[in-house]
Each structure stands twice: as structure tokens, then as C-alpha cells.
Image (spheres, rainbow, N blue to C red):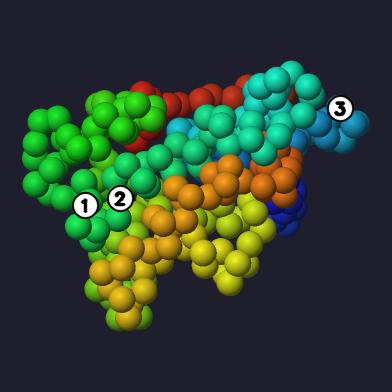
Amino acid sequence: MMIDLALLARDLLKQYAGEKPDLTYALGLSNGGYQTRRALEIDHGRVRKDHKRLFDGGVDWSGAYWPDKRVLDADGNGKVSVKEYAAAETLIGSIDKGTLAMDWFYSPDTLTTPTEYEKNPRFPGAYLPMVNDGFYPESALFWGYYNTVFDGFQYVPGFEIFRGVGYYNLVSFVYRADLRGDDPIESAAYSCWADPDNPFTPPPIYEWLPAAENKGWNKKSVKYALKNANTGEFSVPMLTLCTDRGQG
């Protein structure tokens, strides 16, 4: 889609300005940063096949990174098994850990309450699990926010399903469903959405995730993830902006 967007943008600029741009850059934040990096990688492959270059550079701002086979092939047999992918450090793997460590906001055992936030260290009950799972201690300031960021939408009529929805459980659900190719019915088993008729019952993902075989990965989802993984192969300048003070 980034390739298609670049082609469309160049044609539209020619249509309205009378000529195509001299230079084209891709810029993206978070998942958009991944899209930028991936666009440069795909464009690099196109150039090697004698296609005209589309991107002259890019800015990847806090972009998500999806490792490829060279990183994930733990046993060196040239393949990435479902077990290898499930055991690897990946974006979904990290987010899943945050989902379970912080728990659902309305659970009796949740560690995301304002009272827990005020303690030192912040969220002490979740502190060691989160840090052991790779989250920076300094990022504890944001853990509660990331665990409840969309919760307020539940008060908007028709959006009651947003009760207790945060960045962690939403990303765990949406990315997993996309990579597995599950439709709304198939993904309902690990949904992050609340049931308005049972407002104090945690969404299915909190029960499903700890019991899921290979953390919910299967051959189809691993194949799709690897197809869209970052190769690190591009041939134009790219500026990467990041910090070690984010959520993880």
C-alpha cells in the first residue's frame, strides 16, 4: 500500500502542479514507522529488479520492528517454527506480557488502579513482572495509561464495549486477528471487547491468552508475519528516532 500511495501521490502532484516531485520521502510514527521502513525495503527490492526508485529516504519515528527469519531461526535450520516464533521477542509477545501483567482495569485483582500508581515504585505488584518481561523501569509512569487509554469511550452511548480497553489488550487482539486471518467470529475467543450485558466480566483475551498453545501462534500467522517482516535491506538514507523511555 505504501508503494501504491507513493505512485498515486506522484501522479496527483503532477496533475495539480504540472510536474512530478523531484524527491519523495516516507515518514511514519509507531506502526507508521514500521510502514516507512518496510516501504524502503520493498522499494529496494524493486530497484534491484530494474524498477524506478520511488523513495529517496525516510523517517522512522519510534517504529515497530518485526524480525525476519535470520533473527528468529533459533536452531539454524533455515526455517522458523511456530514454537520458535512463540518464544521470540516480538511486538505482540511484549504487548501480551503487558496485557497479562497489568490485568483488566475492572478486575478485582487489577494492578492498574490510581492507588497503585501513587506508590513507589509505581504499580509495585506489576513492577517486577513488567520489568522482567522487558519493560523499562522508567516507563512505569505510562503503564496505567497504556492499560486504560480507550476506557473513556465506554461512556459514549453505543461504545460500551470499550470498558477496560487499553493499548495492550487492543493491540494483542487486533494484531493477532490480522496475522491469524481470523474474522470477527473466529477472533471472538480472544477478543478485548467488554460484554455490555456483563460489565464486570473480563474480556475473553484474559482467559484465552495464558492457556493458548504457542501463545496463539500457528503456521498461518507465522508465515504471514515473516512475509511482512523487516529485512533491514534498503538503499536510501533513513533517519530513525527512538528512545528508551517508552512503554517497553
Residue 97 visible in the current orientation: yes
From the image, tell me which residue sits under label 2: 103
For marks 1 and 2, give the one nearer the viewer. Answer: 1
In this rendered view, identify the residue nearer to me: 236 or 16. Answer: 236
Dot 2 falls on a residue whose secondary structure is: loop
Dot 3 falls on a residue whose secondary structure is: helix
Residue drawn where x is 48% and y is 50% of the image: 211
Q: Earlier in the sequence, mark 1 or mark 2?
A: 2
For marks 1 and 3, give the one nearer the viewer. Answer: 1
Q: Is residue 154 above or below residue 230?
A: below
- Which kind of residue does numbered mark 3 sit on? Arg
From the image, tell me which residue sits under label 1: 109
- Which kind of residue does numbered mark 2 sit on? Asp
- Which kind of residue does numbered mark 1 sit on? Asp
Quadrant placement of the C terminus: top left
Residue 231 visible in the current orientation: no
How far separated are the C-alphas under marks 1 and 3? Answer: 55 Å
Decide if residue 135 is on the left or right side of residue 44. left
Decide if residue 104 is on the left or right side of residue 168. left
For marks 2 and 3, give the one nearer the viewer. Answer: 2
